[in-house]
Image (cartoon, rainbow, N blue to C red):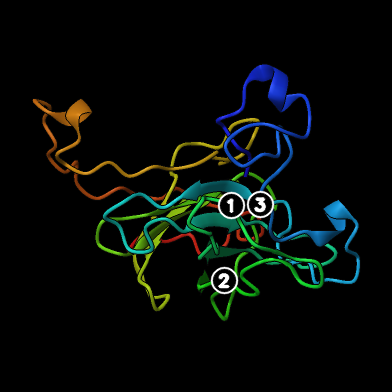
C-alpha cells in the first residue's frame, strides 16, 4: 500500500504526504523476504488482483487477493482475505519482530482438492457474500460460498488459441449495472463443452 496523498516530489523521497513516508510503502504483507525478513514465513506467491472489498459487501475494507502459488515452493492456489490492522490516522502498525499484521488471513478459499493457477487469475467479492474466482490458465470461473462450497461454475468453451483457454480475469456485473440498462439479458440456453484433453484442463464441467 502506498500513500496517494503525496506530491510527485514527495513520492520521490521518504517524507511527506498524509502519513509522512513519501513514496515508501506504508503496508506490505505476504512476502517478508522482499524486505529482508527471511526469518518470517512467506504466505503469498506470485499473487494477482489484490483489491479493497467495497463498502456494503461482506468483509468491506479488507483486502482480497488471488494467491497463485509456486510450482516449486507451494504448487496450489488459494484466495485470501486480509483484515488489515489500521490506526485512526490511517497508518498501519508495524512490529519489528512479526512485521505487518494480520498473522493469518481472516478468510481463505483453500479446497481440499486444490487447484493451481500459476499465472494471472483473480477473485471478486459478490453482494451475496460469495466470491467469484477466476482460474485464468484453465479458463474456469466459479462462485464459492463463505464455507467454500461451489454453487456456480463456467468453463470457457471457445476453441483454444495460441494461449490455450487462458483468461486474464472475470468480473461479475449485477443486472442493475448501468452498462446493462436497456439491454436484453435473456439466457442463451445450455452451452455445450467440446472435447478437451484431460491433461490440459481439470474438471471440464458446468454446474
Choose the circle earlier in sequence order: 2 or 1: 1
- Residue 173's quadrant in the figure? top left
Which residue lies under the disc numbered 1?
91
Dot 2 lies on which element? loop
Label placed on residue 105 = 2
Which residue lies under the disc numbered 3?
27
- Which circle, 3 or 1, is nearer the viewer? 1
Residue toward you, 185 or 172 = 172
| Mark 2 touches mark 3? (CB < 8 Å) | no
35 sits to left or right of 79: right
Q: Position of residue 179 (x, y in %)?
A: 22, 26
- Which circle, 2 or 3, is nearer the viewer? 3
Choose the circle earlier in sequence order: 3 or 1: 3
- Residue 125's quadrant in the figure? bottom left
- In this rendering, the count of numbered labels is 3
Q: Position of residue 153 (x, y in %)?
A: 37, 59
Q: Residues within 10 Å of mark 3 (few under 14, many from 20)?
A: some
Which residue is drawn at the image coordinates 70% and 24% (left, top)?
Answer: 10
21 sits to left or right of 109: right
Q: CA distance from mark 3 to mark 1?
A: 8 Å
Q: CA distance from mark 2 to mark 1?
A: 19 Å
- Residue 74's quadrant in the figure? bottom right
Dot 1 lies on which element? loop
Which residue is drawn at the image coordinates 30% and 64% (left, top)?
Answer: 129
Choose the circle earlier in sequence order: 2 or 3: 3
Residue 139 in sight here:
no
Residue toward you, 48 or 141 = 48
Residue 191 in sight here:
yes
The relative height of residue 62 versus residue 147 in the rendered view (above or below) is above
- Which circle, 2 or 1, is nearer the viewer? 1
Amino acid at each position: 500500500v502506498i500513500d496517494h496523498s503525496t506530491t510527485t516530489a514527495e513520492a520521490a523521497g521518504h517524507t511527506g504526504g498524509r502519513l509522512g513516508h513519501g513514496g515508501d510503502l506504508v503496508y506490505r504483507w505476504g512476502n517478508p523476504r522482499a524486505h529482508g525478513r527471511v526469518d518470517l514465513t512467506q504466505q503469498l506467491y506470485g499473487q494477482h488482483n489484490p483489491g479493497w472489498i467495497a463498502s456494503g459487501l461482506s468483509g468491506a475494507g479488507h483486502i482480497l487477493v488471488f494467491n497463485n502459488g509456486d510450482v516449486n515452493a507451494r504448487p496450489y492456489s488459494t484466495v485470501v482475505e486480509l483484515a488489515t490492522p489500521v490506526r485512526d490516522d490511517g497508518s498501519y502498525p508495524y512490529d519489528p519482530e512479526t512485521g505487518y499484521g494480520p498473522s493469518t488471513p481472516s478468510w481463505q478459499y483453500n479446497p481440499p482438492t486444490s487447484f493451481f493457477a500459476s499465472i494471472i487469475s483473480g477473485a471478486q467479492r459478490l453482494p451475496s457474500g460469495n466470491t467469484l474466482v477466476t482460474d485464468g490458465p484453465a479458463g474456469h470461473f466459479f462462485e464459492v460460498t463463505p464455507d467454500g462450497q461451489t454453487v456456480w461454475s463456467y468453463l470457457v468453451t471457445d476453441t483454444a488459441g495460441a494461449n490455450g483457454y487462458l483468461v486474464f480475469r472475470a468480473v461479475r456485473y449485477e443486472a442493475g449495472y448501468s452498462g446493462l440498462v436497456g439491454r436484453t439479458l435473456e439466457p442463451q440456453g445450455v452451452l455445450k463443452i467440446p472435447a478437451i484433453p484431460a491433461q490440459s484442463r481439470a474438471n471440464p464441467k458446468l454446474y
